[in-house]
Each structure stands twice: as C-alpha cells, then as structure tokens.
Image (cartoon, grey):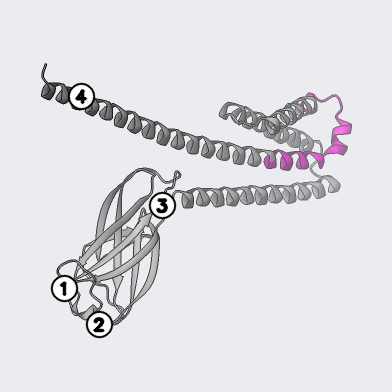
C-alpha cells in the first residue's frame, strides 16, 4: 500500500469518526428537548390536580357548614342511620384530604376518589335535610332555618363561583406561559443592494428583524407570524391578506411561517417591498402569532 492510499484511508476514518460524533450530539439534543417537554407537561398536570383538590376541599367545607345548621335536629335523631353514614363519609374525606396534602405528587386516581366521596356526602346531606323537613314544615323555627339553608346555598354558590374564577385565572396564566415571545425588535429601511438606507423616502424595502427566545412552555411546530406596519399617517402598509384575532379578521403587511423547536431563534426577518411613497415620521410595527399580539413598538424613520 503506497503513502497516497494510506493517507486517503486515514482521512476516511476521520470523517466517519466526525459523523458519529455529530450523530451523538444530535441524539443528545433531541433527548434533552423531549425531557424538557415531558417535565413541563408533568408540572402542568400537577398544577391542575392541585387546583382541582383545592376546589373539592372548598366544596367539602361548604357542605359541612350547611350540615352544621342541623346539629339540633341531629341530636333528636341520634339513632338515624343517615347521620352515621354522613359522619363515616366525613371522616373518610378528611383522611383523604390529609393524605393528599402530605403527598408531593398528586394522582388523578386519588383526586377522583375524593370527588366521589364528596358526591356521596352531598347526597347524604340532601337526604338528611329532606327527612328533617318532613318532620314539620309548618314549624316557624324550622322555616327560619330553611331560610338559613338558602343563605348557606348562596354562600356555597358564591364559593363555587370564586373557585371557577380562580380556575379561569389559572387557565389564563397557563395560556400566557405558552405565548411566543419576541426580543430585539427592529425596523430598517433598505437599498436595492440590501444595505441600510438612512433616507426612508428612498427605501425599496423595509426589514423587520427580531429574536424568539427559548420557551419550554410554548408548543413546538410551525408558527405563522403576521406583521403589521402602520405609516405616520395611520395607514397600513402592504396587503398580504388577513388573519383571525380576538374574534375578527385583521389585515396584515406581510407574514412568515417558521418551525419553532423551543430553542432560541435569533435573526428572524420579515421583508416588505415598498410599493408606495414613504414619509418621515413614526412607524408602528406589530407582530401577531397564535391569536396573541406578541410585540408592538414605534420607530422614527428620518429623511
């Protein structure tokens, strides 16, 4: 074997080794990204289960408070099996809540078990109230207590509304966490050769550039980013169709589809070819994606 062939063999081996190293690095990056996504999903699931547990605990307190209004009647019905069943169900719920509070990781099975027990308690309460009412609805004192029950029901409804509002706030926070973010937004007039044009009236293109930071909460995949540029006179530049936003259709200057992987994407650019006379003044640049306004900024372009 001559020196030339030996040299070629060594070069080939080096290329193979470099290829193997590149494949290993790619595999590591993919595995790491999948792990981050799985972790975010697990944290989101735990947040939802914890919120559901809080809602159930509030409902249990409201039911127990309503039952307390009938303590005098309970003393008169000591031998009633419903009271015994109610107390047994109550003890089981309190034990479940204590166990759930001590658990670092919530499970859907345990939350469903708590939900079933509270449903049983609610049914026992309704049956118990019906029995008491049947003893003497003409009794003035009992009628007064019935009014108190209505007040408790209103309080229970109010608590449920508060929990629903908390759930809505939590859902909104989770949605905002998934929002695509933008940094370093800029607007630059360009010449024919692609270089910066200081005089906006001579520009043949407007370039909008920005960076999309890393966000493990944002779903990965294709993202269409819509650009709106408004002139100093308040007119929208360009006509690249429209997009859905906040229940309506909004026209845009230009748009661009990117593949978002969750990693930082620097130097994203969107161009608009000038087809009308531009004047010096303040221009407004807005970016939209996934039904969010992700950026809005004013730029002063000079003559």
Q: CA distance from mark 1 to mark 3?
A: 32 Å
Alpha-carbon span between mark 2 and mark 4: 63 Å
Q: Earlier in the sequence, mark 2 or mark 4?
A: 4
Residue at the top extreme?
1
Is residue 147 visible in the rendered structure shown here?
Answer: yes
Residue 60 located within the stretch drawn in magenta: yes
Nearest to viewer (mark 1 / mark 3): 3
Above or below, 169 against 216 in this view is: below
**SS class of the residue under badge 3?**
loop
Residue 248 location (% of width, % of height)? 33, 62
The numbered disc on residue 275 is 1
**Which quarter of the picture shows residue 194?**
bottom left
Magenta highlight: main SS: helix
Question: For the residue carrying disc 3, how many other residues have a C-alpha within 10 Å: few (<14), some (14-19), or many (20+)?
Answer: some
Residue ID for mark 3: 213
Marks 1 and 4: CB-CB under 8 Å?
Answer: no
What residue sits right under mark 4 in the picture?
10
Q: Nearer the viewer, mark 2 or mark 4?
A: 4
- Relative placement, left or right, of 285 versus 147 is left
Choose between 284 and 93: the one closer to the eye.
284
Residue 199 is situated, as x and y percent measured from the top left of the image, at 24, 80
Cα–Cα gap, marks 2 and 1? 13 Å
Q: What residue is drawn where x is 71% and y is 28%?
A: 99
- The label on residue 279 is 2
Q: Residues within 10 Å of mark 4 (few under 14, many from 20)?
A: few
Q: Verify CB contact (< 8 Å) between mark 3 and mark 4.
A: no
Question: What segment carries the magenta color?
Answer: 58-83
Note whether 189 is above or below 265 in the view shown.
below
- Name the quadrant of the N terminus: top left
**Residue drawn where x is 58% and y is 36% of the image:** 49
Q: CA distance from mark 3 to mark 4?
A: 42 Å
């Amino acid at each position: 074997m001559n020196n030339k062939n030996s040299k070629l063999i060594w070069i080939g081996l080096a290329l193979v080794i470099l290829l193997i190293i590149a494949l290993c690095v790619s595999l590591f990056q993919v595995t790491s990204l999948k792990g981050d996504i799985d972790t975010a999903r697990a944290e989101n699931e735990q947040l939802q289960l914890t919120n559901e547990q809080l809602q159930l605990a509030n409902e249990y307190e409201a039911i127990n408070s309503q039952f307390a209004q009938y303590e005098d009647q309970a003393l008169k019905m000591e031998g009633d099996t419903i009271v015994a069943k109610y107390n047994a169900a109550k003890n089981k719920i309190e034990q479940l809540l204590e166990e759930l509070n001590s658990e670092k990781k919530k499970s859907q099975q345990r939350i469903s078990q708590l939900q079933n027990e509270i449903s049983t308690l609610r049914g026992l309460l309704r049956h118990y109230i019906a029995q008491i009412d049947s003893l003497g609805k003409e009794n003035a004192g009992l009628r007064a207590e019935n009014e108190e029950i209505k007040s408790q029901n209103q309080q229970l409804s109010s608590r449920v509304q508060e929990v629903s509002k908390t759930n809505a706030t939590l859902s909104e926070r989770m949605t905002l966490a998934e929002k695509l973010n933008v940094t370093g937004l800029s607007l630059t007039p360009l010449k024919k050769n692609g270089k910066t044009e200081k005089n906006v009236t001579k520009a043949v293109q407007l370039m909008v550039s920005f960076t999309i930071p890393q966000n493990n909460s944002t779903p990965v995949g294709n993202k269409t980013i819509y650009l709106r540029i408004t002139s100093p006179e308040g007119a929208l530049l360009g006509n690249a169709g429209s997009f859905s936003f906040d229940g309506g259709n909004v026209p845009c200057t230009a748009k661009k589809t990117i593949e978002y992987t969750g990693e930082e994407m620097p130097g994203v650019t969107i161009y608009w070819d000038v087809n009308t006379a531009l004047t010096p003044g303040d221009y407004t640049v807005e970016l939209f994606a996934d039904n969010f306004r992700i950026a809005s900024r004013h730029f002063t372009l000079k003559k």
